[in-house]
Image (spheres, helix red, strand yellow):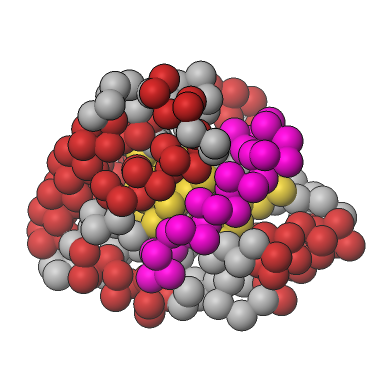
Amino acid sequence: MTRAELIAQIKAKRSFLCVGLDTSLDRIPKHLLDFDDPIFEFNKQIIDATKDLCVAYKPNLAFYESLGIKGWESLQKTLDYIPKNIFTIADAKRGDIGNTSSMYAKAFFENMDFDSVTVAPYMGKDSVQPFFVYDNKWVILLALTSNEGGKDFQLIESAGKPLYQEVLETSSQWGDSSNMMYVVGATRADWLKEIRNTIPDHFLLVPGVGAQGGSLQEVAKFGMNSDCGLLVNSSRGIIYASDGPDFATAAHKQALKLQQQMEGELIKFQII
């Protein structure tokens, strides 16, 4: 998906919502366990309930890999079911030496046909570069995460600035705003202003709104640019809004609530 196509979807749906498909057999409604593929059935109903309200889906690959071959099959069926005009993110957090990264890129972009993949930058440029070979595909680089342990390394001072800032400045030369995004946690939304000074044009994938306590209004205030420039993810707050037979209806309700808030922010910042 191109940048222009993604922006068009944001404006058409009046939303910058990404729904995280962190689907676990331990948390899906029990009646779904009678299906041949409970994971896919859950995802299918969530997609049907939210596809008109979101612009992206983000399966977290750990939840599928942990189930072995059946999990990979559920993931592929889920990916095939997502409408083609919705941006797809392989939340895989890959990153390795060049020839290994080339195989990761082939797996997610050729074989599975995701639009994007999350990548860890720790091993440097040659571990990320193979993902840029593919047209209209995106690297989403981990920059500033919202987990408690993120400060162990990301905030270490390097040449008078936090390490995450060095990551932003250096990596922004590897790609551009048409093929690279960054992960920035919503629970550190007040730092988005400084981040935007460094990367004013790139899209930001922002987890942590909802169950993790991040504020959508704060994220928009500090992170939105003239093209919106945000994909705000909600996983548990939407997909596990109910653990009963009404789970899809409850997911729709929560997604609609976020979409309506996002519409307000898009109007406020004159994006739509």
In x, y percent, where is residue 41? 44, 41
Above or below, 110 against 45 in this view is: below
Above or below, 11 against 53 in this view is: below
Residue displayed at 47% across by 27% down: 34
Residue displayed at 54% across by 36% down: 36
**134 and 226: which one is in front?**
134
Residue displayed at 48% across by 74% down: 1
In x, y percent, where is residue 195? 44, 52
Q: How many dots with numbers?
A: 0
**Image quadrant where one finds the C terminus:** bottom left
Q: Quadrant of residue 266?
A: bottom left
Q: Confirm whether residue 68 shows in the render.
A: yes
The magenta-colored residue range is 62-91
Above or below, 219 against 271 in this view is: above
Side (left or right) of 6 relative to 110 = left
In x, y percent, where is residue 79? 52, 56
**120 and 64: which one is in front?**
64
In x, y percent, where is residue 244? 29, 22
Side (left or right) of 125 relative to 6 = right
**9 and 226: which one is in front?**
9
**81 and 195: which one is in front?**
81
Residue 76 part of the magenta segment: yes
Q: Confirm whether residue 184 shows in the render.
A: no
Residue displayed at 59% across by 33% down: 63
Residue 187 part of the magenta segment: no
Side (left or right) of 85 relative to 100 = left
